[in-house]
Image (cartoon, rainbow, N blue to C red):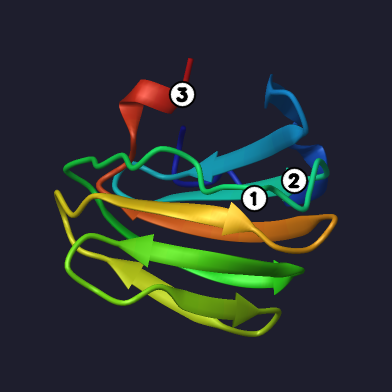
C-alpha cells in the first residue's frame, strides 16, 4: 500500500469465515480494523476463549453481547459500548441478540487473519 492509497470500507469485500459470520478488513502497516457482522444469535453459550499477542479494542455498533475475559466478571454490553483486551489475555463473547456488528481494532495487525 502506498501513502497515496485511501482505504474505503464500502470497497472492501466481505468474507464469510464461519457460519453466521462475515468480516471486512482494513489495515495499514501497524493498525487493523475488522468489522464483523454476526447473524446467528442468540447463542446458548459463549465461544471458546482465545488470545493473541495483539492489543485489541472492540466497539459494539449493533446488538448485545456478553464479554468474558479471564480474571474478570462477565460484562453485558450493548450498541455504543466498547471494551479493550490487553495482549495475551484470554477472552470470548456470547451473542445475546439475534445479530450484532462488532468493530475490532488491533495493533499490530493480525497477519493470521489476513489470509
Q: In this image, 75 relative to 16: left or right?
A: left
> Which residue occupies the foreground of this view, 48 or 17?
48
Seen at 63% across and 71% down, the residue is 60
- The residue mark sitting in front, 2 or 3, is 2
Q: Is residue 7 above or below residue 58?
A: above
Q: Secondary structure at mark 1?
A: strand
Q: In this image, 16 relative to 105: left or right?
A: right
For residue 73, say whether it is visible. Answer: yes
Q: Secondary structure at mark 2?
A: strand
Looking at this rendering, what residue extends furthest in the front direction?
44
Residue 112, horizontal then vertical, whole percent: 35, 23
> Which residue occupies the foreground of this view, 62 or 12?
62
Residue 79, horizontal then vertical, whole percent: 71, 79
Residue named by callout 2 = 38
Residue 53, horizontal then vertical, whole percent: 16, 43
Tell me whether the residue at label 2 lies in contact with that at label 1, contact meaning CB atoms closer than 8 angstroms: no
Which of marks 3 and 1 precedes in the sequence? Answer: 1
**Category of crowding for the residue at label 2, using alpha-carbon neighbours closer than 10 angstroms: few (below 14), some (14–19), many (at least 20):** many
Looking at this rendering, what residue extends furthest in the top direction?
115
Instruction: Give residue 114's mark.
Output: 3
Residue 85, horizontal then vertical, whole percent: 28, 64
Looking at this rendering, what residue extends furthest in the bottom direction?
80
Instruction: Give residue 35's mark.
Output: 1
**Category of crowding for the residue at label 1, using alpha-carbon neighbours closer than 10 angstroms: few (below 14), some (14–19), many (at least 20):** many
* Residue at mark 2 to residue at mark 3: CA–CA distance: 19 Å
Seen at 22% across and 60% down, the residue is 70
* Residue at mark 1 to residue at mark 3: CA–CA distance: 13 Å
* Residue at mark 2 to residue at mark 1: CA–CA distance: 10 Å
Q: Secondary structure at mark 3?
A: loop
Instruction: Give residue 12's mark.
Output: none
Q: Is residue 100 above or below residue 9?
A: below
Amino acid at each position: 500500500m502506498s501513502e497515496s492509497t485511501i482505504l474505503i470500507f464500502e470497497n472492501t469485500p466481505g468474507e464469510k469465515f464461519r457460519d453466521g459470520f462475515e468480516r471486512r478488513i482494513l489495515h495499514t502497516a501497524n493498525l487493523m480494523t475488522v468489522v464483523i457482522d454476526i447473524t446467528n444469535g442468540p447463542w446458548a453459550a459463549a465461544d471458546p476463549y482465545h488470545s493473541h499477542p495483539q492489543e485489541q479494542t472492540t466497539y459494539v455498533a449493533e446488538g448485545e453481547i456478553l464479554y468474558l475475559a479471564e480474571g474478570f466478571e462477565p460484562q453485558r454490553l450493548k450498541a455504543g459500548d466498547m471494551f479493550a483486551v490487553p495482549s495475551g489475555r484470554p477472552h470470548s463473547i456470547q451473542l445475546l441478540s439475534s445479530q450484532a456488528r462488532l468493530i475490532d481494532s488491533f495493533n499490530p495487525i493480525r497477519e493470521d487473519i489476513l489470509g
